[in-house]
Amino acid sequence: MRGQRGVSSVVATVLLIAVVLVVAVAAGNFALSFADSTQEPAPQVHASMAPVEASDGYLNITKNGGDELRVSELEIQIRNASGGGTVRLVDLPASGGLGGSNLEGDGGMVDNGSGVIVGGSGVEWTAGDEIGVRLPNVKSGDRIVVRIIHPETDSIVWEDMVTVS
């Protein structure tokens, strides 16, 4: 009887160590997979939007500061919250007009001949540069919501609303 007790305590110790090792490996595996799934933080953008006049419909966003971004890394969503449509400007060119491949949604909201960068270097959106488009169908009283989206981090880096006067 005495010999069996010694064996059972050794077996119990080995089993306990095995269970602890399995739990430790599982916890380590979970921690490593969680660390791999984290992504870079979204860039910071400080900007302001000029008032939109119904007479010309120009929407200009001036970057006041924040991280330097390439225009091609951004998407711009423009929504007429007063019952109008929504358009998303994608695959932005550094300069020149917008083509059909640059517009998702209600393409009639934006004048296709609009340039994307009004002032600045054209490729990088830095402090003092403006992004501008023309909204030909806005009316006085329309509320326009603009979002600048950074698709790489799937985040909205800037959002504001303006009422057309």
Image (tube, rainbow, N blue to C red):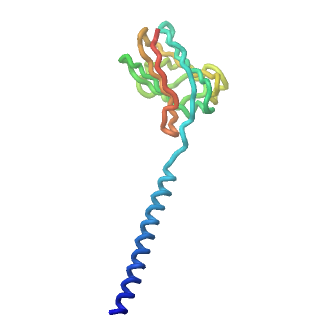
The N terminus sits in image quarter: bottom left
Residue 156 position, x and y percent, is 49, 32
Which residue is pictured at 47% across the width and 19% down the height?
110
Number of labelled discs? 0
Q: Position of residue 100 (x, y in %)?
A: 48, 26
Residue 96 in sight: no
Which residue is drawn at the image coordinates 55% and 20% (left, top)? Answer: 48
Q: Residue furthest right?
A: 121
Q: Nearer the viewer, residue 28 or 119?
A: 28
The one nearer the camera, 140 or 64, is: 64
Identify the residue at image location x=41%, y=19%: 80
Closest to the observer: 65 or 56?
A: 65
Q: Is residue 163 left or right of residue 92?
A: left
Against 18, is 96 above or below? above
**How far across and down, in percent of the image, does residue 29 sit?**
47, 61
In this rendering, position of residue 85 left or right of residue 52: left
What residue is at 35 percent from the left and 17 percent from the top? 83
